[in-house]
Amino acid sequence: MTMSTVSSAHTVAPPGPVGVVAPVDSDPLVAARARFFAGSIGPGGYRSADVRASGRGELLQLLEAEYGPRPWSTVAGGDPVLDRNDAAVASLRRACRLAVPLSPEALLAHTRGGPRLEAVVAEMWPGAVQRHGREHAEALLRTLVTTDPDTAASAFLLNLAVAAGLCPLTAAEAAELAGSTKDRAARHAAWRYLYLLPDGPARLPDPSAAEDVYERLLIAPPAVPIGWDGSRPGKLVAQTMLLGRLDRPGEGLSGGLSVLLGGLGDRLAVTEGIAGVVTLVAAGHDDLERDPRMVRERGPGHWVLRIPVDAAGPPPPSGIHLHRPALTWWAARLLGSMTRPLDVLHVRYADDGSLAMAEAAARVGARLVFTAAPDPHRHLADRHAHRSPLDAEAAEELRHDVHRIFAADRLVDRADAVVAIPGQGGTQELVRHFPVLAGLNDGAGPSAIPEGIAPYRPAPDEDERRDALLSALFGGGHRPHSLDPADRGLPLLVSVGRLHPVKQQDLLVRAWLASGLYATTTLVLVGGGPPPGTAAENAMRARIRSLLLGCPRARSRFALLPALPNESVRRLQRALADPANGIRAWYVCPSAKEEFGIAVLEAMEAGLPAAGPRRGGVTHYLRDGVNGILLDTSSAAGLESGLRRMAALPERERERFARAGRGLVTTRYSIEAMANALARQYAAVSKADQP
């Protein structure tokens, strides 16, 4: 394996020699990580004496606990220290990054510390078993499982047994535990454990005893009927899409990534060097009841494989840790049952779901590729700087962000290759947040794989379909999903995306109202699933309704369309951009940040001038005043200023931005170029260990 193409294998580089001083950074998270990985964690450093009255103070305490010299921090002035659970989590994460050889006993002292503590114990457990021996670990697990009446702890311990292939219980004992417990997680853990034992599957109950479709599948897992005909040589590749639904972008958690992976999988499957593509998606109870198929062929050589989850639908980011052991087990079992081995698995999100997929890749012998992104690292300190220290929800969000940073480090550590989303400064921002990546490619950092969009394919009756979309859009201002036909001549602002706080559709409506543009323009939002919808969708709709409540004129010039299929979104964008329809439209992305912004690229490719956020990856291709406008989306006032600027531009400038944007996207951001680059990366990582 060469550092020019892949990451260091399965051990994060330890801190360098003491005395090597890392550059000081104004971002306390960046400074903490730079000093830690440079081996210069002396007293003082990124710590601050004034941490008493802000959210950043709590962040600094967490950083000192995880990256600093002491187990946990104390604060001048009598402020409370972090609690012991925070301290334990931080200490274990630090030990994990430094590859400190903790014993199984030391790790299993933390079986009741919550999901973040369990996550780091799970990461360190295989190494502890390897160092101290399987027999010792099995005996310890057996003692704890058989003497501890806490079934939740038993579930965690059995999950550790499965992860390391240990057999602390007999099949009869595991079956008895499964049959006697009322704890669903413990029952499922015991059933998964039974598959380890030669006589274990015979101890599983009859599927008729299952409570629901998920338990029926767990008792009798199906094989994966993917028909490999061997006609295409090359690598078999899997990619993951566990948050949201692949085929319903704009609903719930499904957004640009579902559009990207759908088109990318289709293109990769016909790219030289790729034998086939499997896209892994999460399927909850409702999905499985509606459609029991585990696999379907989306296109030639591209299969969608559903990973069952014990929830109504795909789990939210804040809850995916609850499914990590099961996701690993399901993915390894289903991928392992295919008629040919998987070569490469590619993950793109820093969370417990991706860690589960990484472990599954190891179990089936596949190489792991991770797309690293500077999120949630970017602006984390600013986001949490001014919140109240008494805000429990914000405190939990902070800890969730810090946990995702640990997950990202573990994925970098586990990966056989790390690739980057390109940014305005190449990969410099990514390396700033991941110091261990600085040595890749002779110091240039990880390779940046250009993202792209699939070509738009017009329907045979394209003109009729475009006319129908516009007729529905201007069907009457008295309805919430359409505009008054009399307003068709006004400039139109359109934004597409899932209804979620990070997308900030409410901020866009607020700025549109405050700027007075409702008097001279119309505003169209596209996104959100059908009722009842998710909590985030319902909250966003409620905020928008509240904003519009006192302004009837604005209500008639505002439309909120439900999420549309991607081909319909792109058709609507083309209809709005077509000069023959006489609509002067802008595409506006009000998100707090976008990692890349597939929807923005699609709008530009359709011929709409675009305005997008200054924060994130949009700045890689959208140049302010050249092919669009960059917006300050950090506040309503900043967004309002940007909208005023857009409205004041003469028509010739709007048209110039549209031409320049479309030309850039069509020449540089194709899905074909992305697929070709990834195919080369997959071939390189597969050959890395060959002599």
Image: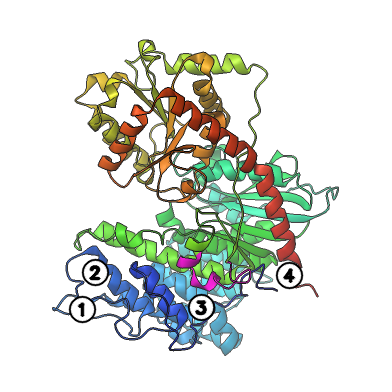
Residue under circle 1? 75
| Image-quadrant location for residue 393 | bottom left
Question: Around disc 4, counting alpha carbons within 10 Å, would you say few (fewer than 14), some (14 to 19), or many (20 or more)?
Answer: some
Residue 107 in the image: state x and y as whole percent: 45, 81
The x, y position of residue 147, in whole percent, is 43, 81
Q: Does the magenta portion include 433?
A: yes
Amino acid found under the numbered disc labelled 2: Gly
Residue nearest the viewer, comparing 530 with 257: 257
What is the number of the mark on residue 57? 2
Q: Earlier in the sequence, mark 1 or mark 3?
A: 1
Which residue matches tag 4?
688
Residue at numbered disc 3: 124
Q: Contact, CB < 8 Å: mark 2 with mark 1?
A: yes
N-terminal of the pair, mark 4 or mark 3, is 3
Residue 600 drawn at (x, y percent): 49, 38
Q: Report the Cα–Cα distance between label 2 and label 4.
A: 44 Å
